[in-house]
Image: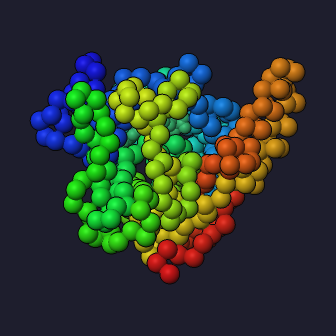
Amino acid sequence: MRPLADRLRELIALEGPITVERYMDLCIRHYYAGRDPLGAAGDFTTAPEISQMFGELIGLWMLEVWHGMGRPVSCRLVELGPGRGTLMADLLRASRLLPDFRSAVSVHLVETSPALRERQRAALRASGFRIEWHDRFGEVPPGPVLLVANEFFDALPVRQFMATERGWCERLVGLEEDRLIFGLRAEPEKELGRPLRLGDVLEWPAASMEVAKALSRRLAQDGGAALIVDYGYEGPAFGDTLQAVKDHAYADPLAEPGEADLTTHVDFQRIAQGASDEKVRVHGPVTQADFLLALGIEARAAGLRQKATPAQAADIDRALARLTERGPKGMGELFKVLALAHNDLEALPGLPARSPLSA
Ligand code: SAH
């Protein structure tokens, strides 16, 4: 494939500077389309790749919520952005405890990358389930939904606006000679009002809010719950969180377009705002550490240790520590868990309920 950098230079020379949102969109699609970026040999590692306990506990969460839904005989088990398919494989293995659940669910993976669809097919071959793939959530057929999305929303593009004396101006990517550079649109975005502090950056996750809206519409209509896990914060906050990661280290987001993983931190308040529906309730967010501990990750680790060699037991301990590590840089605290659920589901395991969003 031609390097994306060449195509971007051509596009910008022809059409002028593009928004950060469009830049991210082009980079992210290119990045995922032809590679598997996960794991030690890739660019980054995710919770399901750290330990089978992560997917298993989410599986138990699903079983319990399915009970809470009144054990519907037909239910869509959906994952957004399943990566290598590891989480779904672990989840389905954990569901062996409940044959009724297994015969009720059909598995739907929302994945745009052809390379990762192949990985998922291989990972799930032994699961015994027929898998359906979709390009977007809206293509998942009607019916009650149990959904999980781990590190999916951080991979969706955002618009960025910078606080200037003129107002909030959209951040753009343009060209200086042959080099990609950041710039600003001269005209401010009037609808955003006046900024309070010069230099602030406002991120507007339009794509994430669109997905949240589609999810909540479905949950309101057909029932069910969606579990969202990602690194992020509960806004409002102002800051540039765009980051590039390559070979497990931070990189310049403009240096190698489409060759590094581009993400932003997820603003959970905006997701909740996008999901606003009088029939849908928000649960959480809580930290990943609190969530996994409440679901019993320590007991699960102890169970696994019993059958493990000393080397395996050390791995289990390391994984447990990593998934639940506190502190601003620890995965257990940086990552948050939020669920959206039909109002009929008053309590969800591991998550405190908030008032209905419409209130
Ligand atoms: N959930 C996995 C992988 C996270 S990486 C894990 O935790 O290991 C992000 C995943 O989202 C990849 O599978 C990527 O191909 C997919 N993805 C990114 N943008 C997408 C989009 N717009 N629609 C569907 N899938 C997308």
Placement of 196 over or under 259, stated as above or below:
below
Residue in the picture at 25% in, 19% down? 2
Q: Most extreme residue toward the bottom, as rendered?
A: 359
Placement of 143 over or under 329, stated as above or below:
below
Residue 66 rendering spot, x and y as whole percentages: 59, 56
Q: Quadrant of residue 167?
A: bottom left
Residue 92 rendering spot, x and y as whole percentages: 59, 38
Left or right side of 311 for 189? left
Residue 231 rendering spot, x and y as whole percentages: 57, 48
**Can the viewer see residue 300 in this picture?**
yes
Q: How is the image coloured?
A: rainbow
Number of numbered discs present?
A: 0
Q: Most extreme residue toward the front, as rendered?
A: 165
Q: Most extreme residue toward the left, as rendered?
A: 14
Compare residues 232 and 283 and report the one nearer the observer.
232
Residue 135 rendering spot, x and y as whole percentages: 33, 40
In the rendered image, the quadrant that contains the N terminus is top left
Which quarter is ligand 1 in? top left
Residue in the picture at 73% in, 48% down? 327
Left or right side of 349 for 35? left
Residue in the picture at 55% in, 48% down? 230
**Can the viewer see residue 139 in this picture?**
no
Q: Quadrant of residue 15?
A: top left
Compare residues 4 and 77 and report the one nearer the observer.
4
Residue in the picture at 46% in, 73% down? 279
Q: Quadrant of residue 324?
A: top right
